[in-house]
Amino acid sequence: MVQKKKVSGNPEPPETGVLKHPKHFYGRIHILVKNRLWLQVIIALILGILAGLLIGPSFGLIDTDLSKLIGEWASIPGILFLKIIQIVVVPLIFVSIIIGLVGARDLKQLKKIGLIFVVYLIFTTAIAVGIAILLATTIKPGLYVSADSFDLEGNENLSSDISAFSMPDFKDLPSLIDSFFPTNLFGSIVHGELLSIVFFAIIIGISLLILRKNKSRPLISVLSSVQGVCMIIIKWAMLIVPIAVFGMMVKLTSGFGISTLVGLGSYVMTVLLGLFALICVYLILVFIFAKITPLDYLKKIKDAQLLAFSTSSSAVVMPLSMKVSEEKLGVRPSIAEFIIPTGAVINMNGTALYQVIAIIFLAQVFGISLGITSLLVLSFLVIGASIGTPSVPGAGIAVLAMILTGLGIPTLGIILILGVDRILDMSRTTVNVTGDLTASVIIDRTIKEDASPK
Ligand code: ASP
């Protein structure tokens, strides 16, 4: 018999032949899963989906009302998680952008960061819209689906989800532009208007950078404390992420008919293919600018991606993205703290791609032909709309309604795609978050190379 060396302190459990004590497996699994948020989230996701499908209408094992009730109860940890994050997301976006801006070396460097960010936004949004038009017009997903095959009657209550995000009408464009320039900081904070908050934060951040150090220091230290408090609260919220994800998936899939997914398969697959292509573009950009290989990059950002997939909200993932950007991708805090929160609000390429495909799909379903001019108008509308889309679940489809009206496509079409929107929301949010992280790492590396010490 081979003698085992004694390890001091922590004795190995005795070998019991082929069969090992269950505790042994538990110990191993515990070590494997501990401190690996991504693994915990994946396990929770899979278990949640399975549990949800099992009690859902597809299997018909239990009564629909009971499965609905179980779904509601299961979603409580998820609601709690989202509520905690919502408490801190507004102040966190506000203070992080300011702290990021004042962390810049000087105004010249700030200009450079801003310029690269704008170029990045224009370039990647154009690619996203281009991919969407290419895929939707070549695959033509709308030709596989007939509007008549959907029961649009009696679904009006679904549109209440949409009206929750009622957007200004297309003809109100001037007043929409006017609303981009807010006048009351506290009003914007109270109403959670993220775009306005970003606007204020940028103005205040630049002013603080110009202000003399002895005058700006007190305010900066107060803002840093606010940021610290928010991060502690987020740390607490993160403790319940796996259980929250499990519950959210149970609720999501328990009310989910697989038949809806199959019926709209061509549309779902086109959007997913487009999002996948966009992720590939990001991976190539990161490889070119930051010399990080695709696999390595995905490994580093998977925590943020999985949380985006589970929560469907870039705003909720923003604090984790900031951490991932700084700690895993080595982005300087001054850049991460400016780019990630700003990106979470305005950089939504996954949403833009999805909106273009959804519009072309619906136009095909309703037999409306979109010529080159319409496609061009559509592209500009979507670029503007994706910037204005709030970074919360379901916002993309709500904003879509406004664009549809502008293009003369029946808004009722939204009801067609609402049934599968959650899965697409999860996927496009993952791409949105990946886009923010990619922007931060590219800007960090570009500025580093360029900035020659004076
Ligand atoms: N849920 C998305 C996000 O937070 C926005 C959307 O609905 O497209 O990034």
Image: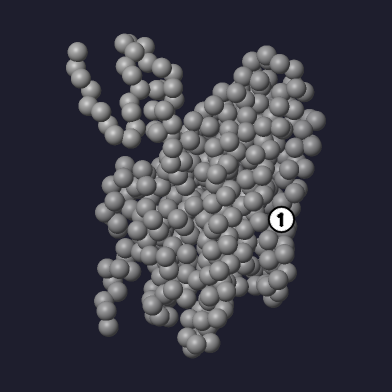
- Amino acid under disc 1: Met
Where is residue 350 shown, x and y percent of the image?
A: 50, 48
Quadrant the C terminus occupies: bottom left
| As drawn, 408 above or below 62 | below
Query: In this figure, which residue is indicated by the disc labeled 1?
Result: 167
Q: Specify whether 437 is left or right of 348.
A: left
Residue drawn where x is 47% and y is 76% of the image: 102
Residue drawn where x is 61% and y is 52% of the image: 85
Indicate the quadrant where residue 25 lies: top left
| As drawn, 352 above or below 172 | above
Coloured how?
one colour
- Element marked by disc 1: loop
Where is residue 15 shown, x and y percent of the image?
A: 32, 16
| As drawn, 101 above or below 363 | below
Foreground pick, 389 / 267:
389
Indicate the quadrant where residue 22 lies: top left
Q: Specify whether 14 is left or right of 217.
A: left
Circle 1: is it few (<14), some (14-19), or many (20+) Cα within 10 Å? some
Foreground pick, 272 / 75:
75
| As drawn, 405 above or below 56 | below
In the displayed image of the protein, which residue is found farthest to the left?
2
